[in-house]
């Protein structure tokens, strides 16, 4: 058992995958020499050399398409896109190429690539360095989307993502990079599509993922003092998402609250709410409620950003109202 | 040029003529409603594809364009599975899910025709990267048209291929047209200047002279295999048909279309063959053989079955295992 930071959990997964499979190839802006803006890939150049990990020019569209071409030609590329906001420049590669290759080529091939990218605000990074765009990718048939909430999950999910034959967008919340947590020496990879009940409860199901899991946990402890017992379901994987785990929890609590840092409108929560309204209609004792970002770009000023982000108090208020 | 050998010339002829006859047949099938969707024919540009078929090895990879039938056939896609695909049959090379603009065969390094203009370039770049990382001497070819010269990924890819000395051939089929507009109205810099800017050797050839293209492409491949970095090969050619089949081409002048006479790569090569002692009668015999093969493939494709919905849905992901 080792205590690792979230970034170190990712680093360990990358290192082990590179040791285990010579086809794993890392590239991205400033990831080799400098070790990435958040230090995630530090030390890998020394161990594996420039044939296995490379700094790239600032050419996201070409890098992402190159990942597709490399994946079609025998490599397992892992590309880092420095901020999720820059994923907008990779959309053709992901949406038109990676997501569709298996289907449109009649099942001839898989596209085993991973794009790692940080999302999330809270550091005054402004409107073009803070967005949570995971719903865009979850909307595309052929892509998988993962978003871990702690070092052990970051490790286990990234190993699964790299070993997975399909294209995976691996989303890392910036606020979590420094978080510490235990990662077992023989920690297994975590199958994509499996949620984790991080807190059992009987009064309300709170579905969330990524950094919001921690806000949810703090809110749950306040709510517990008031007699509201919250069950927290950490999705871990957004596409595919663990519908059965959410439904099973709803059957225990009969109330559903969905929390994410991404914009509420047309978001991940909208899909979960719609599915549960259909599959879990008879279980619901109250309307499904979402706590998420408003339909506004992420602002720069700390005071504005604090208002923008869903906060512990918003979660508590929503849960109280649900349980009235 | 050590290619005076008659068998060699006949091989080149068969490759080029097969592409021509497959596409002409395809055009008729399309007009008759037997090919759904829309198709972009490369009639007039066959010399470039055929030349690459001669030069490339099975382990070399190519990424192609929306006008990619010739590239796919040149890389070795079976004609029958090609017709099966374009006629939307389950037995097609892509099981009827891709059609004309997505013909691919991974097992022979044909990474797909592509409906996104310019996308072939960075995808081929990634394939070249894989060849380099895996330390093989295979090369990758990015087919693109002059219409893709204004796409940003070309410029990014020229930079990166040069920076990393990737075994990538930038193969431009310059037919003067970017969909419905003349390229000179869309793009200011000639390709040789772009290549110069990124320190990549550039060569421009008559793309209707198949032997000239073979010569230039062979030299490019020979330079790339030992690790000397990318090459740009610009093949000047002509698009005889519309942007798509059925395009009335009101934007092209009668003079321009009349001027195509004398630039037909097949007719030009037939003159070469005649001079080398392969007479009209032998040429006609080869044409008839290919036509018979094409017709047999079309007949077989007509007998193909309808694609299955469940099977299609099962190929959205490779692994849906434990969810």
Image (cartoon, coloured by chain):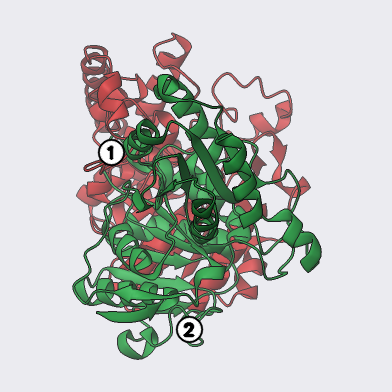
Chain colours: A green, B red
Q: CA distance from mark 2 to mark 1?
A: 54 Å
Q: Nearer the viewer, residue B242 or B305?
A: B305
- Residue B232 location (% of width, % of height): 51, 65
Residue placed under numbered mark 2 in the picture: A35
Judged left or right of residue B292, residue A58 is right
Judged left or right of residue A268, residue B137 is left
CB-based contact (under 8 Å), mark 2 and mark 1: no
- Residue B93 location (% of width, % of height): 27, 32
Q: Is residue B309 above or below residue B259?
A: above
- The quadrant holding residue B140 is bottom left
Classify the position of the C terminus of chain A by image quarter.
top right
Residue at (28, 38) in percent of width and height: B14
- Residue B81 location (% of width, % of height): 25, 29
Q: How many marks?
A: 2
Q: Residue B14 shows which numbered tag?
A: 1
Q: Is residue B80 above or below residue B168?
A: above
- Residue B321 location (% of width, % of height): 22, 42
Q: Nearer the viewer, residue B277 or B1?
A: B1
């Amino acid at each position: 058992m080792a205590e690792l930071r979230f970034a170190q959990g990712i680093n360990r997964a990358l290192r082990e995958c590179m040791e285990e499979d010579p086809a794993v190839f890392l590239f991205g802006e400033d990831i080799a020499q400098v070790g990435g803006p958040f230090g995630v890939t530090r030390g890998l150049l020394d161990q594996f050399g420039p044939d296995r990990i490379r700094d790239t020019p600032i050419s996201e569209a070409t890098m992402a398409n190159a990942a597709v071409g490399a994946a079609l030609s025998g490599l397992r590329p892992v590309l880092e896109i420095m901020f999720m906001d820059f994923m907008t420049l990779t959309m053709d590669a992901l949406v038109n190429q990676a997501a569709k290759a298996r289907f449109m080529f009649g099942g001839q091939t898989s596209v085993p690539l991973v794009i790692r990218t940080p999302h999330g605000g809270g550091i005054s990074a402004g409107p073009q360095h803070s967005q949570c765009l995971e719903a865009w990718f979850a909307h595309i048939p052929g892509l998988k989307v993962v978003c871990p909430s702690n070092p052990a999950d970051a490790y286990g999910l990234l190993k699964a993502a790299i070993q997975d034959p399909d294209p995976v967008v691996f989303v890392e919340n910036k606020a979590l990079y420094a978080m510490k947590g235990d990662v077992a020496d023989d920690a297994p990879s975590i199958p994509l599509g499996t949620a984790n009940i991080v807190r059992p409860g009987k009064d309300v199901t709170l579905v969330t993922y990524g950094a919001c899991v921690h806000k949810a946990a703090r809110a749950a402890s306040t709510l517990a003092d008031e007699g509201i017992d919250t069950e927290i379901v950490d999705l871990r994987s957004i596409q595919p998402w663990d519908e059965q785990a959410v439904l099973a929890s709803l059957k225990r609590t009969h109330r559903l609250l969905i929390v994410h840092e991404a914009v509420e409108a047309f978001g991940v929560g909208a899909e979960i709410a719609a599915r549960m309204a259909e599959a879990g209609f008879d279980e619901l004792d109250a309307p499904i409620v979402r706590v998420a970002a408003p339909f506004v770009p992420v602002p720069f000023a700390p005071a504005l950003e604090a208002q923008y982000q869903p906060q512990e108090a918003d979660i508590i208020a929503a849960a109280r109202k649900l349980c009235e | 040029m050590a290619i005076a050998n008659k068998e060699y010339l006949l091989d080149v002829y068969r490759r080029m003529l097969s592409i021509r006859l497959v596409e002409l047949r395809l055009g008729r099938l399309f007009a008759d409603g037997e090919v759904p969707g829309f198709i972009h024919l490369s009639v007039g540009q066959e010399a470039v594809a055929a030349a690459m078929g001669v030069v490339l090895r099975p382990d070399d990879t190519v990424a192609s364009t929306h006008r990619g039938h010739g590239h796919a056939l040149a890389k070795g896609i079976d004609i029958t599975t090609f017709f099966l695909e374009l006629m939307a049959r389950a037995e097609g090379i892509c099981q009827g899910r891709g059609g004309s603009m997505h013909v691919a065969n991974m097992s022979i390094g044909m990474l797909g025709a592509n409906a996104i203009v310019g996308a072939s370039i960075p995808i081929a770049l990634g394939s070249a990267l894989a060849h380099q990382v895996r330390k093989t001497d295979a090369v990758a070819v990015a087919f693109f048209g002059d219409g893709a010269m204004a796409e940003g990924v070309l410029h990014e890819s020229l930079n990166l291929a040069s920076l990393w000395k990737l075994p990538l051939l930038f193969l431009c089929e310059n037919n003067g047209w970017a969909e419905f507009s003349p390229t000179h109205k869309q793009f200011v810099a000639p390709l040789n200047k772009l290549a110069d800017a990124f320190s990549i050797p550039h060569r421009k050839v008559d793309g209707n002279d198949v032997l000239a293209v073979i010569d230039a492409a062979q030299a490019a491949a020979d330079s790339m295999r030992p690790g000397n970095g990318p090459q740009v090969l610009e093949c000047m050619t002509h698009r005889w048909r519309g942007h798509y089949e059925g395009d009335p081409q009101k934007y092209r002048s009668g003079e321009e279309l009349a001027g195509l006479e004398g630039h037909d790569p097949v007719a030009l090569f037939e003159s070469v063959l005649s001079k080398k002692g392969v007479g009209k009668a032998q040429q006609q015999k080869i044409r008839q053989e290919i036509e018979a093969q094409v017709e047999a493939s079309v007949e077989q494709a007509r007998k193909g079955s309808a694609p299955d919905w469940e099977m299609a849905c099962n190929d959205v992901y490779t692994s849906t295992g434990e969810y």
